[in-house]
Image (spheres, rainbow, N blue to C red):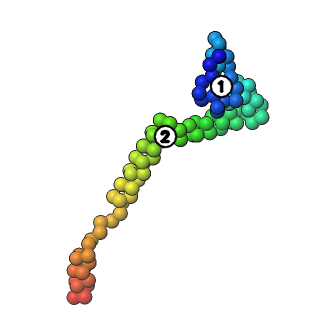
Amino acid sequence: MVVPADSDSADAYVIMNGVVYPVDPAETKAYQHNLRLMGGNAAVLFDDVNRWFAGLWRGRALAFTVAWISGFASLAIFLFARWLPDDPGPGRRIEEDRHEKDR
């Protein structure tokens, strides 16, 4: 029997053809069934969403998550900067003050 290196995180194992595979208990039908009995279909859905969201912060998915967040943040800053009024600059304000005094 050969045990894979990532077996530290597994709580259960399946033996197929003499090879031991780690199994995440949350992926088993028994876990899904028990969760459905305790909390209904909503609990299963929330558990799936929670696992999906937690998976966004690991490995290759983290790179895509950071890229999307950076893209949205830069787009938001760009649109906010376009929304701001143009700065007339220091020279234009002095001229406007002179014209107001002459009136």
- Label 2 neighbour load within 10 Å: few <14, some 14-19, many 20+: few
Quarter holding residue 34: top right
Q: Residue at x 24, y 81 (%)?
A: 94
Q: Residue at x 64, y 33 (%)?
A: 9
Disc 1 marks a residue whose amino acid type is: Val
Q: Residue at x 39, y 56 (%)?
A: 77
Residue 48 location in percent, x, y?
63, 34
Q: Is residue 100 above or below residue 43?
A: below
Q: For the residues carrying marks 2 and 1, which lies nearer the camera in this image?
A: 1
Q: Residue furthest bottom?
A: 102
Judged left or right of residue 73, residue 89 is left
- Label 1 neighbour load within 10 Å: few <14, some 14-19, many 20+: some
Q: Residue furthest top?
A: 17
The residue nearer to you, when weighing 101 against 65, is: 65
* Residue tagged 1: 23
Quarter holding residue 8: top right
* Residue tagged 2: 62
Q: Is residue 20 visible?
A: yes
